[in-house]
Amino acid sequence: MNKWQFTFAVVLGTGYALATSTAFADEIMVALTGYEESPPVTTTATGSGTVTINADMTVSVNITTSGIMATAAHIHIAPRGQNGPVIVPFTKSGDNSWTAAPGAKLTQAQYEAYRAGGLYVNVHSEANRGGEIRGQILPPESK
């Protein structure tokens, strides 16, 4: 292999690695209602937004709520109809908006739960400390 062939091979190899390392990001639209809570909550509050899960399992979140005096919001791990622990806490970024901290990241087990439809966004209030509105985070192929 001459110098030109080696350089070409390295450039091609590098380009391929870059292409595969940024191969995907799932941007999931989430709708939150009291009906999705477990058990269901009667409320007029709603929420919506996006959860983006990148190839490196980092997570970004933008959730907006309406009709609720929210006290906390998070991503939890559990399938629909069940409750589970917090895995990604959110920060209040405006009067009715929430975001995940920069660099928030899922573990491999949490990512696998996401792929199986086992993560959800939950927004809590003083009246409903366990959660007032909820929306399951469903990967694109499971919708």
Image (cartoon, rainbow, N blue to C red):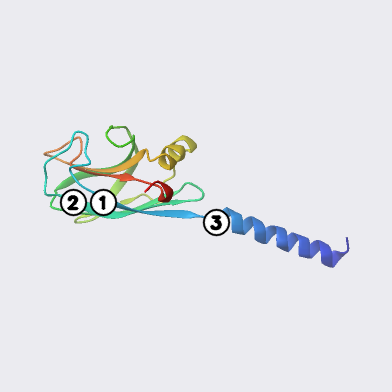
Q: Is residue 90 left or right of residue 41?
A: right
Residue kind at label 3, given as amino acid type: Thr
Say which quarter of the image contains residue 113: top left
Identified at 55% across, 56% down, the residue is 22
Task: Identify which residue, 52 or 79, lies in the foreground.
Answer: 79
Circle 3/circle 2 CB separation < 8 Å: no
| Residue highlighted by disc 3 | 22
Identified at 17% across, 36% down, the residue is 129
Residue 103 can be seen, yes or no: no
> Neighbour class for label 2 at 10 Å: few (<14), some, many (≥20)?
some
* Residue at mark 3 to residue at mark 1: CA–CA distance: 27 Å
Give residue 85's position: percent from left, percent from top. Answer: 32, 32
* Residue at mark 2 to residue at mark 1: CA–CA distance: 8 Å
Identified at 37% across, 46% down, the residue is 138
Q: Is residue 48 left or right of residue 52?
A: left
Identified at 44% across, 42% down, the residue is 115
Give residue 111's position: percent from left, percent from top. Answer: 45, 40
| Residue highlighted by disc 2 | 46
Residue farthest toward the right in the current orientation of the protein = 2
| Residue highlighted by disc 1 | 31
- Under circle 3, the secondary element is loop
Circle 2/circle 1 CB separation < 8 Å: yes
Mark 3 or 1, nearer chain start: 3
- Under circle 1, the secondary element is strand
> Neighbour class for label 3 at 10 Å: few (<14), some, many (≥20)?
few
Circle 3/circle 1 CB separation < 8 Å: no
Mark 3 or 2, nearer chain start: 3
Q: Is residue 126 above or below residue 67?
A: above
Image quadrant where one finds the N terminus: bottom right
Say which quarter of the image contains residue 79: top left
Task: Identify which residue, 40 or 67, lies in the foreground.
Answer: 40
Residue 35 can be seen, yes or no: yes
